[in-house]
Amino acid sequence: MTAIDEVRSKIEKLDQEIIKLIAERTNLAEEVLESKKKEHRSINDDAQNHVVLERAANFATEKNLDTGAVKEIFEILIRMSIERQHELSGEGNLP
């Protein structure tokens, strides 16, 4: 195995771990939805979305990463969670 193959193998393992973490995060949508129902909150919580994006930007800054790109990734993760909550509530992919 060449040096680049070894690095690519490490990247593949990290990619698999990232996917597992995304699935774990998305699966928490059910617990979030149940809590929102009990507290009579709407599925989309703009204030919490802002908190998550700011937290991600701060972590990105600490790791010397492109904060704009990281925020885009987290916008997608938030959207996936919201879509999953809509699905779980029987609303499908409605905005």
Image: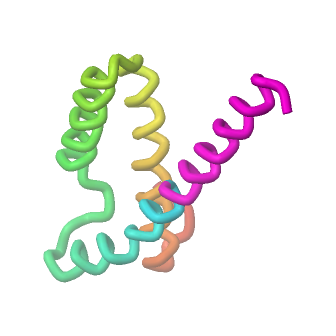
In front of the other: 77 or 6: 6
Residue extending farthest to the left is 39
Q: Position of residue 44 (x, y in %)?
A: 31, 56
Prevalent SS, magenta region: helix
In front of the other: 40 or 65: 65
Residue extending farthest to the right is 1
Q: Residue at x 43, y 58 (%)?
A: 81
Q: Is residue 3 magenta?
A: yes
Which span is picked out in magenta? 1-21
Q: Residue at x 30, y 35 (%)?
A: 56
Image-quadrant location for residue 72:
top left
Please give the count of numbered marks on the rendered protein: 0
Q: Is residue 13 above or below residue 89?
A: above
In front of the other: 37 or 16: 16
Q: Position of residue 23 (x, y in %)?
A: 53, 62
Q: Is residue 44 above or below residue 36?
A: above
Q: Position of residue 51 (x, y in %)?
A: 19, 42
Image-quadrant location for residue 66:
top left
Q: Is residue 28 above or below residue 90?
A: above
Query: Does residue 38 appear left or right of residue 90 in this picture?
Result: left
Q: Residue at x 42, y 58 (%)?
A: 82
Q: Position of residue 54 (x, y in %)?
A: 22, 33
Q: Looking at the rendering, in which quadrant would you find the N terminus?
A: top right
